[in-house]
Amino acid sequence: MRATAPAALQKKWQELIRQQEQSKLSVSAFCRAQGFSDQTFYNWRKRLAADEPVRFALVEANASGTDRLAPLELILASGDRLRIAPGTDAATLRAVLNVLRER
């Protein structure tokens, strides 16, 4: 099990990740300008993302159950919509979400 980093270090990396997202620079360009490796950045981003709780909200429920084959639609913080077809395997969904997180 990985030890928890000191709060000040976590806060520093949260701020760096926020700055990179707002800068519109690629991760590589941002890391070069800041003087650390891409891998360090990605490790911290992954580590801090794992600490965030996953939040779900039930928007609408069909009591009749007739829409069981309807796709699930996620609206991401960016405003993008992701429609997930019934039967989509977890590995594919994980890969798509990882790509979207890196944008």
Image: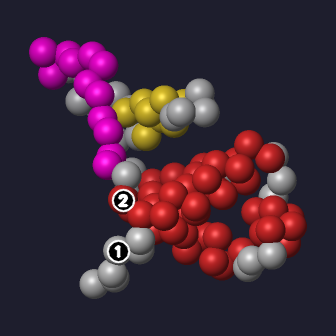
Q: Is 19 left or right of 87, judged from the image as shown?
A: right
Identify which amino acid the numbered label 2 is placed on: Asp
Q: Which mark is residue 51?
A: 2
What colour scheme does the image use? secondary structure
Residue 66 lies within the magenta run: no
User: Which mark's residue is nearer the viewer, 1 or 2?
Assistant: 1
Q: Secondary structure at mark 1?
A: loop
- Residue at x 32%, y 49% (from the top left corner): 53
Image quarter where the N terminus lies is bottom left
Outermost residue toward the bottom in this view = 1
Identify which amino acid the numbered label 1 is placed on: Thr
Q: Is 77 left or right of 16, judged from the image as shown?
A: left
Question: Residue 7: horizontal and vertical position, in percent?
Answer: 42, 64
Start-end of magenta stretch: 53-65
- Lower position in the chain sequence, tag 1 or tag 2: 1
Q: Within 10 angstroms of label 2, few (less than 14), some, or many (20 or more) residues?
A: few
Q: Which mark is residue 4?
A: 1
Residue 13 visible in the shown view: yes
Q: Which mark is residue 64?
A: none
- Is 65 in front, or is 6? 6
- Residue at x 51%, y 52% (from the top left corner): 97
Where 62 falls versus 75 (above or below)? above
Question: Residue 47: horizontal and vertical position, in percent?
Answer: 45, 68
Where 13 falls versus 67 (above or below)? below
